[in-house]
Image: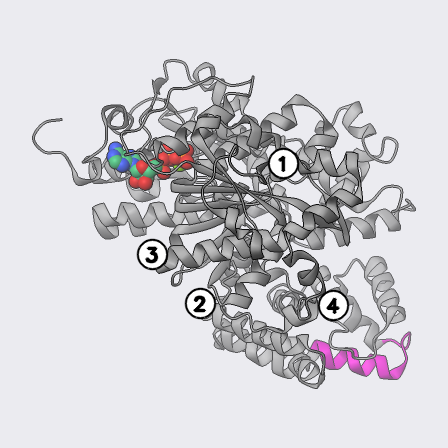
Amino acid sequence: ENGTIPPYAAGLNAPQKQAVLTTEGPVLMLAGAGTGKTAALTARLAHLIATRRAWPSEILCVTFTNKAAREMRNRVARHIGDAVEGMPWLGTFHSIGARMLRRHAELVGLKSNFTIIDTDDQLRLLKQLIVGNDLDEKRWPPRQLAGLIDRWKNRGLNPADLDAAENEAYANGRGQEFYKLYQERLKTLNACDFGDLLLHVLNILRQHRDVLAQYQQRFKYILVDEYQDTNQVQYLWLRLLAQERKNICVVGDDDQSIYSWRGAEVANILKFEKDFPGAAVVKLEQNYRSTPQILAAASGLIDANSERIGKTLWTELPAGDKVRVVGVWDGPEEARRVGEEIERLEREGAPLDQVAILVRAQYQTREFEDRFIQIGLNYRIVGGFRFYERAEIRDALAYLRVIEQPADDLAFERIYNQPKRGLGAKTLDAMSRHARTTQLPLAAASLDLADSDELPARARNTLIGLLGLFVHWREAAEQETPANLMRMVLAESGYEDMLQKDRSPESAGRLENLSELARAMEEYDTLTDFLEHVSLVMDNDARDDGEKVTIMTMHAAKGLEFDNVFLPGWEEGVFPSQRSLDEGGLASLEEERRLAYVAITRARRRCTILHAANRRIYGQWTSSIPSRFVEELPEDMIARETSMTGGASLWRANWSEHDDPFAHVARDAPARTQTRGPGWQRAVSTGYDATPKRLAEPGRSAASFAAKPRSDIALG
Ligand code: ATP
Ligand code: MG
């Protein structure tokens, strides 16, 4: 240790160094938030490469998000330079799964240029199967089936592996049948869904010993961050891959397990020592991220959970502000308040990219977007209403997918009459029927059909014209860059024309989005690469350009840190979510509490929790109760405030609860509104005199919002 400490290990504490230097054999790093787990894992990666224990291509390193993978790559590069460029196996389970599957696609009956379909396509496909097999889609919704199939895939179950109970879970014992139909259908489309990226690979590793042996040889070292959120199929992967060499290092925190709804099993981290006997267990207790107040508040909260290992956390960082708990009148005021605070921080010189608003649910971001656009505050939505999910973007992508993959029926179906070409439902019917009887992909079947006299002449000509365009674009794809191809398609398909002629307020924004799409494609050399990228940017990704406030879900914020964190909507039914309350089980509530722990521990210097007394839900105003998590915070670590506007702002200063005549409003409002009825509400609302005015305020409509230029939003 003394003498020559390599740069990547300098500054690490003793247990961190142990985790870096114990290169051989299994290692488990189990420690609380902000203790430098990811930092140690990154140093370990650098160490393995720098000491030539392995080539970059011989290390499998799994991160939870693509963004985390990028960050890790950058950090390692800073220490050891370009060697890191060849790190093909650094990424999320899904991206690594996609890479493996492309190499061995034929082993599961796919071609290596398979399409990765998204949830939307998945639902449409399932709907077709349900309707096509005389099932009532109202009674047995596609969404339900999609959920079940996801769950099965996350658990590593193929159709044949389902037990009677699982089979019973859909359409009175037809679960297995439909799962099987769906898988077969995907195969004929040369497509797979996200779950398949994991399950197909597991099947390959299980059934092809030679392939497994090849990867076991290749991966001299395996590193996994956020191990507490691995699901069964991921766990089975890792166990197979690590079986030979057993050089597997996993890091995680049982208190931060927040993806059980997606099949994650915190048990995986708890049984690591059983799976890998003799594992070195490293515990980190010093937190380097948060002030003592933030750390104590978070620790106090998570203490309320019963199912946990329990850890000590301490910090040497100097004392900071207490965690603020701010009661506001309603959602718009919450957004206004946060906007003001951020402007103040900005004036004080705080960088905007060190400010984050973490929400429980996607829909909560809308209010903040609305406000920030009004006041001209730069922000980015990470993992939010994703750019690639907008209708016009999906249409454009569908064209590209058909070019890339003529058998992509879902994509073809989406655009065969988009823009309108006069090909109606009847034509689609005829095409689908013909595709079924000839076993051809939809596009090929249409061409076939256009040769027959089954369709009216006009439809035939239109179809031939369209399919001719695809042939032409496919040829162009050989020569043109993906971006140019995109522009060509938009112009020649008539899509651009359609939007230009459209006089609705949205069409301008749509055209902007499309040119932004072409811009985004500039970074890619091949269409395949670009389409794969689109499939994988599903979660948590945004380009880091310039200083912007980040708005994201708490789930997406895992592993990240910000100087200033705002946590709005801490009300019963919002957080903890209504769903977790309805389920009523201890487990779901404890998962919500872990999420609260994750959220608070993202903050380095300041953390502000907000709750509103009133929310508009489905167009109705309802009064709300502050989250139980607010009450569970250790009282001496928090400072309560009530935000008020107009004359009432006299009370805004840092008054303690006892001095503040309105403190009880924020704390007890709902109970009172419920018992005292609307009269009381009116009485209080006079204290918050901006509310009625704001409700009537013009220019708050969705249309005026949508019409605003959105180019300042980076979407991933
Ligand atoms: P989380 O549980 O949230 O994922 P973590 O345990 O992975 O947190 P890191 O993100 O690795 O923690 O580290 C938290 C912060 O502490 C980072 O800013 C990191 O740079 C810093 N840090 C880590 N180790 C040290 C150290 N030995 N000395 C100083 N700072 C450190
Ligand atoms: Mg981490």
Q: Residue at image x 67%, y 34%?
A: 151
Q: Residue type at mark 4? A: Ala
Image quadrant where residue 232 sits: top right
**Which one is closest to the eye, mark 3 or mark 2?**
3
User: Badge 4 is on which residue?
Assistant: 443
Tell me which segment is drawn in magenta.
452-467
In the rendered image, residue 640, in percent from the top left (x then y), is placed at: 50, 37
In this rendering, which labeled residue sits more in front, label 4 or label 3? 3
Residue that numbered label 2 is attached to? 525
Q: Which residue does the image show at 87% across and 47% down from the upper left?
A: 137
* Residue contact between numbered discs 4 and 3, judged by CB atoms under 8 Å: no
The reply to whether dot 3 and dot 1 touch (C-beta < 8 Å) is: no
Q: Whole-Å distance between the Cαs marked 1 and 2? A: 51 Å
Kind of residue sitting beneath label 3: Glu
Q: Report the Cα–Cα distance between label 1 and label 4.
A: 55 Å
Q: Where does label 1 land, which residue? A: 626
In screen coordinates, is 169 left or right of 615?
right
Relative to 317, say whether 337 is above or below.
below
The location of residue 156, given as percent across then percent down, is 62, 31
Viewer-nearest of discs 2 and 4: 2
Residue indicated by mark 3: 348
Do callouts 3 and 2 mark residues in contact (Cβ within 8 Å)?
no
Q: Nearer the viewer, residue 638 or 45?
A: 638
